[in-house]
Amino acid sequence: MTRSIRTPARSRGVDRALVHPDKVFWPDEGYTKRDLAEFYVRVFPRLRSFVRDRLLTLERCPDGMRGDCFYQRHAPSSLPVGTPTKRVRDTTGSTTYVVGGRLATQLDLVNLGCIAVHVWNSRALAPRRPNWVCIDIDPTSGQFADAARAGLLVKEALDALGLASFPKTSGSRGLHVFVPIPPGPDTAAVLAFAEAFVRVLAAKHPKTLTVEARISARQHRVYLDPFRNGFAQTVVAPYSVRRRPKAPVSTPLDWSEVAPSLKPAVFNLESVPKRLEASDPWQGFFRRARALPSPEDLADG
């Protein structure tokens, strides 16, 4: 059974941007490619500031839940002429990335089967100058309740450093905590801060937190992952839909919502647009940027 959540007036415009708009991406829920595109139209006013002028990595799932996915860094030749791109050099050569920020580009990506939006933590004009830090909180137990408890410890530690923090569901079992910073420190310095921060915090809570990348060594502790901050690494953007059952969305939260009782599955392709009627929990994100302390200061603390 196909279940549509579309708005007819909008769908006529969206349909012109899509090939096979009625293709079902989530067969159990009946959500189509059109529904995905309509979602991004609805949330784009809030999504825009987190993809604008950022390099994107494409996670292409052309058959939705029914098929496989693959990651693509290089901008596909099938994108329309004029799609913003940026060539970036690294130790292995160079890659031409799609640059986000236009609704038309977002719909073109949906047309290619891109369900999730994966972004760098820096702008395209300064790819080695991040303007946020991301702490990826991964509960080894698979229970969001554990991620929520760890997230509150992360917030407490960031508060003590005078750093604003903003949580969002990962769209899966975990939690992402973003920290806005002024562009300036290079990627290596930002990664060094993130590694030192999680290492110090895990040492203070050795029974519940860990920085062990090996699952076998975590012993049911929550893994604090700093490596989303490395060069060319990405994280799913706020308001990004995930290719998982029920079409969950990586949803920005207010810290008051982060509790062990929260069920992140309630945030999905159909329900999240209704949250737009309420105040934005991430309002003023970039205005609250503060400089990072040095890793040495963290270790001394």
Image (cartoon, rainbow, N blue to C red):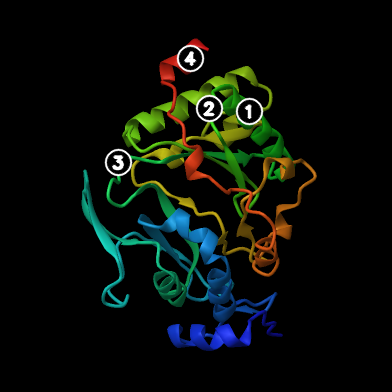
At 30% from the left and 41% from the top, the residue drawn is 128
Q: Position of residue 104 (x, y in %)?
A: 41, 74
Q: Is residue 270 above or below residue 165?
A: below
Q: Secondary structure at mark 3?
A: loop
**Distance from Cα at disc 2 to Cα at disc 4:** 11 Å
**Distance from Cα at disc 1 to Cα at disc 3:** 29 Å
Which residue is tagged 3?
128
Amino acid found under the numbered disc labelled 3: Arg
Which residue is tagged 1?
209
Q: Crowding at label 4, few (<14), some or many (≥20) Cα neighbours within 10 Å?
A: few
Which residue is tagged 4?
299
On the image, which quarter does residue 64 sit in?
bottom right
Which tag is nearer the camera, tag 1 or tag 2? Answer: 2
Q: Secondary structure at mark 1?
A: strand
Amino acid found under the numbered disc labelled 4: Ala
Seen from the viewer's position, the closer of residues 29 and 252 is 252
Q: Position of residue 139 (x, y in %)?
A: 65, 40
On the image, which quarter does residue 154 sit in?
top right
Which residue is tagged 2?
198
Number of marks in the rendered image: 4
Amino acid found under the numbered disc labelled 2: Val
Residue that protrudes farthest toward the right in the picture: 261
In primary-sequence order, the first of circles 1 and 4 is 1
Q: Secondary structure at mark 4?
A: helix
